[in-house]
Image (cartoon, rainbow, N blue to C red):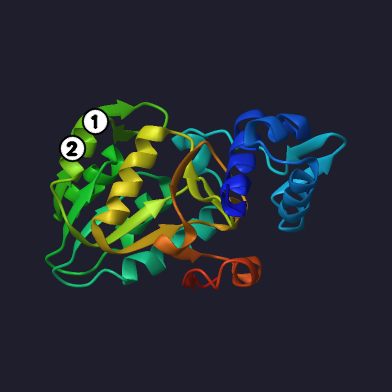
Amino acid sequence: MLTEERHAFILNQLKENKIVKSQTLMNKLQCSESTIRRDLSELENKGLLKRIHGGARSTYQLEEELSVSEKSSKNIQEKQNIAKLAASLVRENDVIYIDAGTTTLAMIDFLTAKNITVVTNGVAHASLLADKAIQTFLLGGRVKYSTKAIIGTDSLRDLKSYQFNKAFLGTNGIHSEYGYTTPDPDEAALKKNAITQSAMAYVLADDSKWEKVTFSKVGDIEEAMIITNETERSLKTYQEKTTILEAEQ
């Protein structure tokens, strides 16, 4: 087994169990103690785990999802700045996807481009877009009560019917190794497909999302540009992998 494959297996084990024993890794990977010791050392040097006696533990805590009302009350000014910059990237006649979420919701007030078409899975987003007389397509499916997002197999099927100039996505976590993540696998599937079906994808995230990991992976860092309010950390950790746009303070 290649080193990269062993590392991926170890990290997946930690993602599931938080702690992993060296003996367990030796048995499952069928390799020597020295190999496991070297792998754990390399991963610890990258900040991806913490070695403990007899094994290793995860260096992060999986984040829980907040409700819309809880999210709306956090980092309000940062979200406004990010939303304004995101909206400025929309051009006349663009066909765009706007993901459900409080930061993406904020960008609707700043949309000024003419003759645009928007597809969204956000119930509140569709309502605001209609108020602005913007041509809007709302995906069908199940409404998730905590986030007011439409998710599920029906929404995913609808989404696959469209192609976009740009997609604007929210995320619950951005991590140098684990990429973009969100707690709900159904929401992750929609975000993932929106990235695939867009010529350009943007992730809108204030600095509270950096180095956070949640349950379901959306994509790798390089699959989207990041629009954020803070780049001091991100320039060091992420700039080699993706473009980062910094909103004005």
Q: Which residue matches tag 2?
A: 157
Q: Secondary structure at mark 2?
A: helix
Q: Is residue 5 left or right of residue 195?
A: right
Q: Is residue 121 left or right of residue 81?
A: left
Query: Which residue type does callout 2 highlight?
Result: Arg
> Do the residues bearing badges 2 and 1 touch, measured as CB atoms within 8 Å?
yes
* Up-down relation of residue 123 to residue 88 (above or below): above
Q: Which residue matches tag 1?
A: 153
Residue situated in front as seen by the camera: 43 or 201: 43
Viewer can see residue 224: no
Residue at position x 46%, y 44% in the image: 217
Residue 127: % across, % down: 23, 43
Q: Which mark is residue 117?
A: none
Residue at position x 58%, y 38% in the image: 12
Q: Tell me where residue 64 sits by quadrant.
A: top right
Q: Secondary structure at mark 1?
A: helix
Quadrant of the frame with the C terminus:
bottom right
Residue at position x 46%, y 56% in the image: 220
Whole-angstrom CA distance, mark 2 to mark 1, is 6 Å
Residue situated in front as seen by the camera: 59 or 127: 59
Q: Tell me where residue 45 sits by quadrant.
A: bottom right
Residue at position x 77%, y 39% in the image: 56
Q: How many marks?
A: 2
Viewer can see residue 103: yes
Query: Which residue type does callout 1 highlight?
Result: Thr
Residue 222: % across, % down: 45, 64
